[in-house]
Image (cartoon, rainbow, N blue to C red):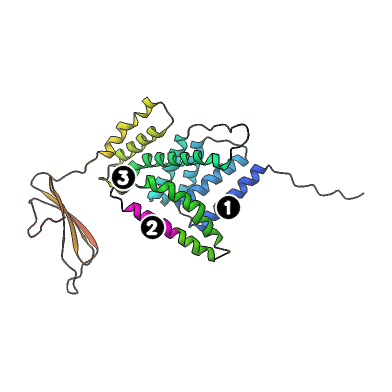
Amino acid sequence: MAPQPAPLPRPRPAQHAALVGGLMLATAYAVFSGWGVPAQRTGWMLAAVALLRLGARDWPRPRVWLLACATVVAIDPWALTQPGFWLSFVAVGVLFASDGQRRPLPSGPAPTSWRRAPAAAAALLREQWVVTLALTPLSLLLFGQVSVIGLFANPVAIPWVTLVVTPLGLLGAPAPPLWNMAAEAVAWLAAGLQLLAAVPFATGSAPAPPLWAGAAGVLGGLLLVMRLPWPVRALGVPLLLPVLLWQAARPPPGEFEVIAADVGRATPSWCARRRTRWSTTRGRATAARPMRASACWCRCCAPRASGWTPSS
């Protein structure tokens, strides 16, 4: 009896092959870029979506988002202490929440690239507005300042890095001369960003709000950008007021606060009274009297320290 031929491998849908190939490419790029928290978030979220699709499961976006969060925290619990973790996952969650329900694919012939360009640009601008509005309270909570010029810089910097810098950097591995072109592209981008950073309103600073105010502000920004009726969106405005109008406690009348940072060569100090604030710089480190890098805070019951002159 003639031997039976070996059975052919079971064919797989093209979508499954695309999922596996995309996941492998994304993982390789995440490892190549340093495997930071944003790269981990992207990799684990893509892995979760790919595994769910390969298993014929269609989870809603919030569950996929929570699964990616739980996976990153389970692998690296210290990620919870990094601002990048919160900024990264909150940004993705806000984009999920503001994008509404999944829309069906349009029927008919696919539009050309030139016809899709205006819609893609409008979508990119909307995403930047949504992320900026929703992350402003969180940025004030974590850093005490927020980038205003980023709303205008990101729509240029993100496509430039995605379409020019990143491909040149990856292709430079087999062809090192392309790294010179990537370096030039980064230099052009840095020059443009420096011009934007010189704008007077490039950043906005405010006193760091308490945790409850920051959480309320993030919720308020989320309500404003979600696809909900405007009466419901308007509820986010009062939630934003505590984080935007928060003022740090000032010293009582007749007292002042001093924050002095000893950096080794001089002692810059910041002083605050009930209605005024000023900065001073005094002292220099010597071999006989070295200074250590430290900081101190004190409150004194006197209008002004002896020998300290207010300066700008």
The residue under label 2 is 191
Q: Which is more N-terminal, label 1 or label 3? A: 1
The residue under label 1 is 25
Element under disc 3: helix
Q: Point out residue 157 in the picture as x, y percentages from the top left corner.
A: 43, 51
- Within 10 angstroms of label 1, few (less than 14), some, or many (20 or more) residues? few
Q: Are marks 2 and 3 in contact (CB under 8 Å)?
A: no
Q: CA distance from mark 2 to mark 1?
A: 31 Å
Element under disc 1: helix
User: Residue 289: which disc?
Assistant: none
Q: Point out residue 181 in the picture as x, y percentages from the top left corner.
A: 50, 62
- Decide whether residue 304 is among the magenta residues: no
Q: CA distance from mark 2 to mark 3?
A: 27 Å
Q: Main secondary structure of the magenta part?
A: helix
Name the residue rendered at 48%, 32% in the picture. Answer: 100
Q: Point out residue 4 in the picture as x, y percentages from the top left corner.
A: 86, 48
Q: Which residues are magenta?
A: 186-201
Element under disc 2: helix
The one of 63 and 119 positioned closer to us in this rendering: 119
The residue under label 3 is 140
Q: Point out residue 52 in the picture as x, y percentages from the top left corner.
A: 58, 40
Q: Amino acid at mark 1?
A: Leu
Q: Amino acid at mark 2?
A: Ala
The one of 204 and 24 positioned closer to us in this rendering: 204
Q: Is residue 92 visible?
A: yes
Judge depth for marks 2 and 1 and give the one in front. Answer: 2
**Left or right: where 20 falls relative to 261:** right
Q: Residue 242 is drawn in which quadrant? A: top left
Q: Amino acid at mark 3?
A: Leu
- Decide whether residue 187 is among the magenta residues: yes
- The residue lying furthest to the right in this view is 1
